[in-house]
Amino acid sequence: MSDAVPIVIYTRTECHLCDEAEATVREVADEVDVTVDIDLVNVDTDEELREKYGERVPYVYVDGRPAFKFRVDADRLGEKLTAARSLD
C-alpha cells in the first residue's frame, strides 16, 4: 500500500456528511485511478479530538494536508489525488 495516497477523515457517530465524504473520496479515487488508504477517525472517542473538531466534521486530510471541511469537492479532490500520486 506504499503507493496509496493517505486520507484521514475525522468523523462523528451518525454523521451523514461524514458518510458522504467517505463515499465521495472512494468514488473520486476510482474515477482518477488513484489508490487511497482511508483512515476514519471518530472524534467522539477522544476528548482532545472532540475539543479540536467538535461539530466541524467531516474534516478531511489528503496526503497529510488539510483539504476539506464539511463537504468534499469532487473536482478539487481529483486534482489533489492526481497531484499526490505524481509526487511519488
Image: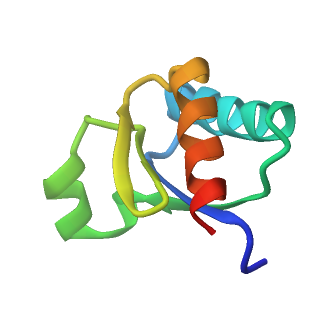
Q: From what the image shows, is residue 39 above or below residue 69? A: below
Q: From what the image shows, is residue 45 above or below residue 7? A: below
Q: Nearer the viewer, residue 78 or 42?
A: 78
Please name the residue shown 30% across and 70% down the image. Answer: 46
The picture quadrant where one finds residue 77 is: top right
Q: Nearer the viewer, residue 55 or 65?
A: 65
The picture quadrant where one finds residue 74 is: top right
The figure's colour scheme reads: rainbow
Q: Nearer the viewer, residue 39 or 67?
A: 67
Image quarter where the C terminus lies is bottom right
Image quarter where the N terminus lies is bottom right
Q: From what the image shows, is residue 3 above or below residue 78? A: below
Residue sitting at the far bottom: 2
Please name the residue shown 66% across and 56% down the image. Answer: 85
Please name the residue shown 21% across and 68% down the image. Answer: 47
Residue 38 position, x and y percent, is 65, 59
Instruction: Tell me how many marks there are.
Output: 0
**9 left or right of 85?**
left
Residue 80 position, x and y percent, is 53, 40
**69 left or right of 33?**
left
